[in-house]
Amino acid sequence: MTKVESHQLFTSESVCAGHPDKICDAISDAILDAAITEDPTSRTAIESVAGANKIALFGEIKTTAQLDFEAIARKKIEEDLGYNNPEWHFGPKSEFSNDVHRQSPDIAVGVDIDGAGDQGMMFGFAINETPEFMPMPIALAHALTKRVDETRIKKDLQWLRPDGKAQVTIRYEEDGRPVSVGKLVLALAHDEETEQKQVRLDAIEHIILPILEEYGFDLPADDDIIINGTGVWHIPGPESDAGLTGRKIVVDTYGGYARVGGGAFSGKDPSKVDRSGAYAARYIAKNIVANGLATKCEVGLAYVIGQPRPLMQTIDTFGTATVSEQALYDFKDKLIDTSVKGICDTLNLRRPIYSQTSAYGHFGKPGLPWEAIVNI
């Protein structure tokens, strides 16, 4: 954290579901969900790319499911994400290409025996400063971008267009308590008829105030609220900035407040420990904090391709543990078997639950299996 006078500052950002990178995450996860619906043993590593009037798929797949990749992508873009205006130079009629190929046999041979589909390290984190057991800056940033999208979908603000960003700076006391919002930044795509002054007034009333009140914060000073830093933003999506699956791993995890592993999540089935290992690590960390064994926890796991069990398992409570280190590891072992099969079975990951993770982060959401609190 940055220290200013007697306070610590930390900033995190989130992006709306219509952000170019999130469009790609959404397409990749929609394909995964479609595959796993028909064939729960499907293996996917789908990379989507979005540019001006172009959508492209790359990656690998092994499945018995019959998939219409193009129809899945076009439905996601138009119906779910709201790209339905040809003047934005991206939408359901954009040029489409598909270069997805069959999974490499060199990878499949290891996964066939319940080994990890890749190597790497994963981290999970939890802290008791929000109801979601997430760091306050990223929790607020996600809440704001979700509110932006809900406001657009409900047409409460007619000028809103898909795409957007939120950035929140939280001021912490020396004892680590989040006490106020220092800076708040929103980027909102809007129609040409609405002036920046109106955008600002509407955004504060309909988006910012309700979220800050929900989390118990006051509005920061007027100069500390920045909406559309350049003063205008009309064209949303890939016409303004190309998108790519997996490019928002900090947004997807803990907003930079905790370490993240080496791989992205979206488009990958749970044999890929980039995804399932990170979910298991969060599950352990959250349950340690939720059960009062610590107020802050980071769990680390590391795997090697083709092997079923992690090579490394660590628990760091940053001096906040209320029990011994051995008790923490015993708790972890009772909670979940961290082999690839153990994670998939305990969290029931071979089902179509992944599209809901493609926006507003993968953690802190009710209903996801790795967010469940278990009393042991």
Image: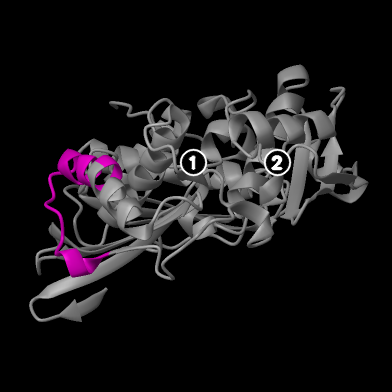
- Determine which residue is flagged by label 2: 28
Question: Residue sitting at 29 percent across and 46 percent down?
Answer: 202
Can residue 214 be found in the magenta stretch?
yes
**Residue density around tag 2, few if under 14, some if 14–19, many if 20 or more, within 10 Å:** many
Amino acid type at circle 1 is Ala
Residue 128 against residue 248 in the figure, above or below: above
**Mark 1 and mark 2: span between their CA atoms?**
21 Å
Residue 235 against residue 133 in the figure, above or below: below
| Quarter of the view holding residue 350 | top right
The residue nearer to you, when weighing 73 against 156, is: 156
Q: Where in the figure is residue 371, as x and y percent of width and height?
A: 39, 33
The residue nearer to you, when weighing 156 against 17, is: 156
Can residue 190 be seen in the rendering of this structure? yes
The residue nearer to you, when weighing 246 against 82, is: 82
Residue 166 against residue 332 in the figure, above or below: below
Residue 280 - label: 1
The residue nearer to you, when weighing 293 against 135, is: 135
Left or right, 193 with respect to 23, comes to left
The region drawn magenta spans 206-225
